[in-house]
Amino acid sequence: MVKATPFLLVLFLALGAHGLSEQKCILTGHWKNDLGSNMTISEVKANGDFTGTYNTSVSAHPDKIIPSPLLGSQHLPDQLNQPTFGFTVHWNFTNATSVFTGQCFVDNEGKETLKTMWLWRSHDNRIEDDWNATVIGYNTFWRLEEHMDEGGSIGAARKQAVKDL
């Protein structure tokens, strides 16, 4: 058993090293999706709750598109390196609401990607029209290059999120 202990220790470290170096995905920051919409997620609180804004680039609505608030929650990064999350968007320019659910992934090069599925629900005045009030879709988001502040450093919320890890 004494001779096997160093071998088992080295084997354990070799097999476990991949998990130890795995990067954590952080939602805080600026994101753009495959349709050109932009999203900014502000600070993720200790309990996983977060807020932000969503600016869609896709709409058939005649009113001017303006950024809309989002409110969400995620599994905490200290529990999962690639957390699941969900958020609701209250559209400011129409009487619709969207809900997104997804997961934050980090690839082998350290690039973060959000894979989401969403429901978009519009208001209907008659129950007979309910059949076409909900649209389902998928989006992939990629992190935009960090916006630099006047001091040449990344935004304070992202910096704090990285520091808290």
Image (cartoon, rainbow, N blue to C red):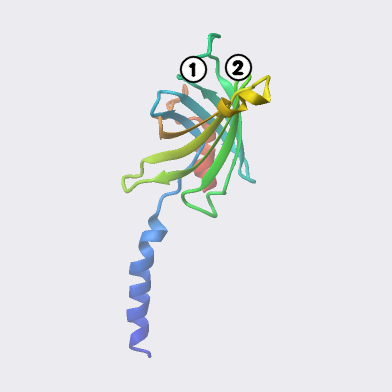
- Using the image as rendered, state which of residue 142 and residue 29 is in the foreground: 142
Q: Where is residue 41 drawn, in percent x and y?
A: 54, 32
**Circle 2 residues within 10 Å: few <14, some 14–19, many ≥20:** some
- Using the image as rendered, state which of residue 82 and residue 165 is in the foreground: 82
* Residue pointed to by mark 2: 94
Say which amino acid is labelled 1.
Answer: Ser
Q: Are marks 1 and 2 in contact (CB under 8 Å)?
A: yes
* Residue pointed to by mark 1: 59
Q: Where is residue 135 drawn, in percent x and y?
A: 52, 29
Mark pair 1, 2: CA separation: 10 Å
Say which amino acid is labelled 2.
Answer: Thr
Q: Quadrant of residue 68?
A: top right
How many numbered marks have been drawn onto this rendered protein structure? 2
Which residue ends up furthest to the front in the rendered image? 128
For residue 160, the mark is: none
Local secondary structure at mark 1: loop
Residue 77 as seen in the image, left or right of residue 109: right
Local secondary structure at mark 2: loop
Instruction: Name the residue: 63% across, 19% down.
Output: 95
In primary-sequence order, the first of circles 1 and 2 is 1
Residue 57 as seen in the image, left or right of residue 130: left
On the rendered image, what quadrant is the N terminus found in?
Answer: bottom left
Q: Where is residue 117 drawn, in percent x and y?
A: 48, 38
Instruction: Name the residue: 55% across, 19% down.
Output: 67
Q: Where is residue 114 drawn, in percent x and y?
A: 44, 39
Which residue ends up furthest to the bottom in the rendered image? 1
**Circle 1 residues within 10 Å: few <14, some 14–19, many ≥20:** few
Residue 13 as seen in the image, left or right of residue 101: left
Instruction: Name the residue: 40% across, 54% down.
Output: 22
